[in-house]
Image: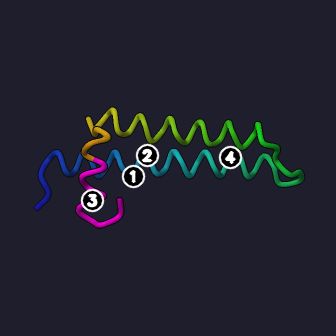
Amino acid sequence: MATRLEKIFRTNTICMANDILNEINTFLESNTKSKPDKNEWAAVYSNITRSICGFYEKNNITDEEIKAALNRKGRY
């Protein structure tokens, strides 16, 4: 049984993923006829980065916690 915090974290994770996918979808739909330039891609990357950073801040996740989690999985 998931705790209240785990349910909140799961909901926040789903919302963040939705925000990122919406950003990408909007960008792709607006550029169906022309090839996007570097500035347009930079704006998309910036918005995605803001979404991820906001997620970390909202859930009080630190860089140290991320590194520790990656080390436990053998990915860092």
Whether the residues at callouts 1 and 4 have beta carbons within 8 Å, the answer is: no
Residue under numbered circle 3: 71
Q: Nearer the viewer, mark 1 or mark 3?
A: 3
Q: CA distance from mark 1 to mark 3?
A: 24 Å
Residue 69, percent from left and from top: 26, 55
Residue under numbered circle 4: 26
Q: Secondary structure at mark 3?
A: helix
Nearer the observer, 72 or 48: 72
Q: Which residues are magenta?
A: 66-76
Residue under numbered circle 1: 14
Mark earlier in primary sequence (4, 2): 2
Whether the residues at callouts 2 and 3 have beta carbons within 8 Å, the answer is: no
Amino acid found under the numbered disc labelled 3: Asn
Amino acid found under the numbered disc labelled 1: Ile
Residue density around tag 2, few if under 14, some if 14–19, many if 20 or more, within 10 Å: some
Above or below — where is 42 with respect to 69? above
Amino acid found under the numbered disc labelled 4: Thr
Q: Is residue 10 left or right of residue 15?
A: left
Nearer the observer, 46 or 69: 69
Mark earlier in primary sequence (2, 3): 2
Whether the residues at callouts 1 and 2 have beta carbons within 8 Å, the answer is: yes
The numbered disc on residue 5 is none
Q: Quadrant of residue 47?
A: top right
Q: Quadrant of residue 64?
A: top left
Q: Nearer the viewer, mark 3 or mark 4?
A: 3
Give the residue displayed 44% in from the left and 42% down from the top.
Answer: 52
Q: Secondary structure at mark 1?
A: helix
Residue under numbered circle 2: 16
Nearer the observer, 26 or 67: 67
